Amino acid sequence: MDATTGEIKMQHELTCNKHLPYYSNLKEEAIEYLREIKGNISLSLLLSESNSMTWIESIVKFTKLYGRYFSKDDHIYLIKLFLEVIITPGLDLRKVHWFIVVLYDLLRKSDLLSPDDLTIEWRPLYELYIRMFYNSKETYGLHVVPDSFEFTFKHFIKKARIYFPKSATKEILDELRPYLCVYNTIAITRGTVLLNLFLPTLMKPEDHDKGFKLWLEEFLTLWDTNQNNPSWEQNLVNLFSRLAQDSIGYIDWDPWIPKIFTHLLRSCNLIGGSRKVQMKRTFNVQATSMLIISLLGGPSSVAMSHVAKLFSALESYYHPSNIGKWNTKLSQFLCALSIEFINRISKERYQKKTWMPEIPSEYKLTDKEITEFVNILKPIILIHMFSRSGERSSAYACQLLSTIRPELIIPPLIDKMYSSMENLIEPHRLISSLQCVFSVSRNMVISNKHYPEGQTHVIPLLFLALPGLDPNDIKKCMITFQFISTFVSLIPLVDCSSAVEFRKDLAQTEYDVCLATSQWEDFVFQFIERCFLLIENSSFEHRPERRESEAFRINSEEGMTELGLTSSFNSILNQCSPQIFERALDKVYCYLSNRIFEEKVSGKFAANICRCFTKVNPELTLKKFWPHFSKQVLHLTESDDVLHEDHLDQQLVFNLLVLSEIVRCDGHHLLNYKDSIVQVLRRTLLL
């Protein structure tokens, strides 16, 4: 309860609900609904009614509608109620599954409840898990577990173990240590799976003596003494990575760092030297990345130096000419490291304080360490971006790292882009460069004190990208459409060159950008001309001898081209100034009014362009297009002979196609053309 107002303090409210028009009545509605749910759940459970599932599902529905809009006492009450229910012997497994789904939903936001507020006994959950998933009757079909039950249960345990009592670690170790026999693969696999699942690692610093200090040294030694990459090794790595993330700054990993990186490099399953034996199992990318990033920081630089050595050893395997089964894993590893690094920075610098232990200030990542880490990954990304399997992962890594160090990531990417544009005989290199550059588009166009020069490259790059709209290379064409639409959607296409005459406070970069904006109109015109060329080269050809698979491929390519063309036009027309819009409209009108296209492909593309104009400014577009094309339709249908033709004139069909697209706007814009529309409909509905 709030001490100042006397009102009951709610756990968490959906932010978006505050913007609803009936927000003032929403609180009472939520409280009344929760009261109804609590009463009916309690009653249905006491009476063992079959419709209790309806009210259980209502809890999930309540959290989706209102968030966790209940008091802490209600929150704890619901959790304890469902915990008591799921351990009831003989309960239907489908009901147990649903109760666990609700429990996971209630425990999902761990910051709302601390271990001081709630305690969950581990043994009933452990016994339920063993009864469900280590049941000998399952072999004979006498024990059937619902689909996705194990997945849901594991996610629930991950949230519940935070609230295990302080004595839980010792009790779990006493229960599972007998399974840790390296000569019995089945037993040790079961033991490590359960240890990884149930051992709590998120604890307050004063409770560490009852936590990881009871087992860390023992398990690290167990892991290190088995060098043959056993099947249970990954369970321990997952446990270590979780512990490292939850206890940054509280564990001295330095003595073990060389061995950790040696294990990692060995599990990459790389080919090199005289090694003949290949391991079937490889490392878990996410867990390994989490472990490495959690080791960084602090007074010691051992972890950072080993990261540098690791990528120095892996650099040749990221080269485009080095292709093997390791490529996919290494690409994922590059992305996962970048994601975990960004997540840690966000946690250290921007996350709100909660009951969870805070990272000691001396172990938080410094600006120098961030720069060093980005410099380690940068050459790997610049090499890997041109490999077959690495363009997407490299683009994603660039996007993440450019948010923290744009001055290190963006300049070499732009240089690669310029060199790729000059050499058009390597389309794969150009496609990779385009994909990586538009992935950092946001960090290029924003006002960034670390890299203000990024804005000066936008317009030249857009001009250089236009030759990529090649109808003979669908992949390059689609990437170019995506490149243009991404950049254009972030900036207004307005001529600001006159600002340099009356603004005397502009920096040199701002001055150059203002002058460069005078080229926007030229860019829009060149883009439209490229699209016209694309339309002319996309006519439909019917060939009976064409195989079905080939026809399907061509149809899918046409569909992708149509999507790219439409989205790019929408982005440009939505962002351009009224003056540029009118001139672009005139250009498209002059082109289409003097040409006839078949209706299957090229005519469809042209009509979609008209629809894009209508979507942005229906009044101007209708005024420009409707009189001409409606007049053409009426002229071509004035003779009754057209009603008896088996195949309509191509000009008539194309004009109808354009009219059908430009009328897709708000109805009040069509009222001025009501009579003409009715006249066209009367002549064409009989065709």
Image (cartoon, rainbow, N blue to C red):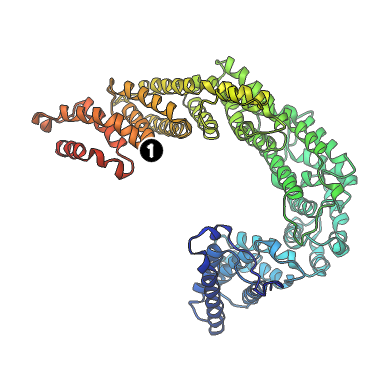
Furthest toward the bottom, the residue is: 47
525 lies above or below 251: above
Q: Which residue is mark 1?
A: 615
- Image quarter hosting the N terminus: bottom right
- Position of residue 19 relative to residue 544, above or below, is below
Residue nearest the observer in this picture, 141 or 658: 658
Q: Is residue 599 left or right of residue 433?
A: left
**Secondary structure of residue under mark 1:** helix
Give the x, y percent position of residue 80.
66, 75
Number of marks in the rendered image: 1
Q: Quadrant of the C terminus?
A: top left
The amino acid type found where label 1 is placed reads Lys
Tell whether 631 sits left or right of 279.
Answer: left
Q: Is residue 645 left or right of residue 166?
A: left
Compared with 485, 525 (above or below) is: above
Specify the quadrant of the image occupied by residue 508: top right
- The furthest residue to the front: 502
| Mark 1 neighbour class, 10 Å CA radius: few under 14, some 14 to 19, many 20 or more | many
Q: Nearer the viewer, residue 594 or 258?
A: 594
Name the residue located 34 percent from the left edge and 26 percent from the top edge.
602
Front-most of 564 and 231? 564
How far from the left and from the top, in percent, is residue 554?
Answer: 39, 29
Q: At x 64% / y 26%, what residue is drawn?
A: 510
Say whether residue 225 is visible: no
The picture quadrant where one finds residue 67 is bottom right
